[in-house]
């Protein structure tokens, strides 16, 4: 990954990824962005594609190797391109496009869970991600968000979950 393949901020890939910052586009495309090495590593089974700067590719080669082994396209991109796709002020150089992980509520109940975290009217994405992370740490079997709660695929919620979003069924 020496020379970045993706250099234009106007590329259709960059534009499509940037649109995923909005809930309506995430819902329509049924995809969301994961940022940083930890989140991308945890999301491997759900990724559609990965973008990394040459520096991040060098630092996190094992993540890109795992993505390639799972037949996930990996693209080299400039710092500006990755920053455009990211929601953070200081991007970590690696982002992934991920498929929605929704589990039907009926499926979760059919599994007879012992512990379920229910988020009712949670409006702050950081709080939602933190609850997801805590539910994972506490050994919960699932997380359920009511209609009045924040979108679990909001970039801030995904970051705050620090990969736990990929460990639990979410409805």
Image (spheres, rainbow, N blue to C red):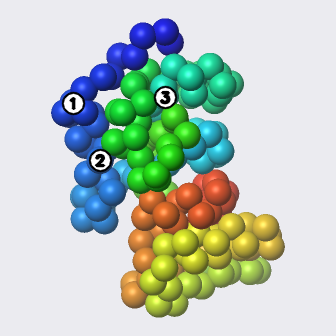
Does residue 146 appear in the picture of this structure?
no
The one of 145 and 159 positioned closer to us in this rendering:
159
Does residue 139 appear in the picture of this structure?
yes
Residue 29 is situated, as x and y percent measured from the top left of the image, at 28, 52
| Residue for point 65% across, 81% down | 117
Q: Quadrant of residue 82?
A: top left
Of labels 2 and 1, earlier in sequence is 1
Mark 1 residue element: loop
Residue 30 is situated, as x and y percent measured from the top left of the image, at 34, 55
Label 1 CA crowd tier, 10 Å (few <14, some 14–19, many 20+): few
The one of 166 and 23 positioned closer to us in this rendering:
23
Against 14, residue 30 (above or below) is below
| Residue for point 73% across, 67% down | 136
| Distance in Å between CA atoms under marks 2 and 1 | 11 Å
The one of 122 and 136 positioned closer to us in this rendering:
122
Residue at the bottom extreme of this rendering:
121
Residue 98 is situated, as x and y percent measured from the top left of the image, at 45, 46
Against 106, residue 38 (above or below) is above
Mark 3 residue element: strand
Q: Which residue is mark 3?
A: 52
Compared across the picture, whether 116 is left or right of 16 comes to: right
Q: Which residue is mark 2?
A: 18
Q: Which residue is mark 1?
A: 11
Of labels 3 and 1, earlier in sequence is 1
Against 27, residue 116 (above or below) is below
């Amino acid at each position: 990954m020496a020379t970045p393949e993706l250099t234009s901020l106007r590329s259709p890939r960059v534009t499509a990824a940037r649109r995923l910052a909005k809930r309506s586009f995430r819902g329509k495309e049924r995809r969301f962005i994961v940022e940083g090495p930890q989140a991308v590593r945890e999301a491997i089974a759900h990724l559609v594609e990965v973008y990394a700067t040459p520096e991040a590719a060098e630092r996190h080669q094992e993540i890109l190797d795992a993505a390639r082994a799972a037949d996930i396209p990996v693209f080299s991109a400039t710092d500006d391109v990755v920053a455009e796709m990211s929601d953070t002020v200081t991007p970590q150089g690696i982002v992934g496009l991920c498929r929605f992980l929704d589990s039907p509520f009926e499926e979760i109940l059919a599994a007879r869970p012992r512990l379920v975290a229910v988020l009712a009217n949670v409006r702050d994405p950081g709080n939602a991600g933190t609850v997801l992370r805590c539910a994972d740490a506490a050994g919960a079997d699932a997380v359920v968000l009511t209609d009045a709660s924040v979108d679990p695929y909001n970039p801030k919620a995904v970051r705050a979950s620090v990969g736990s979003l990929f460990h639990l069924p979410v409805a």
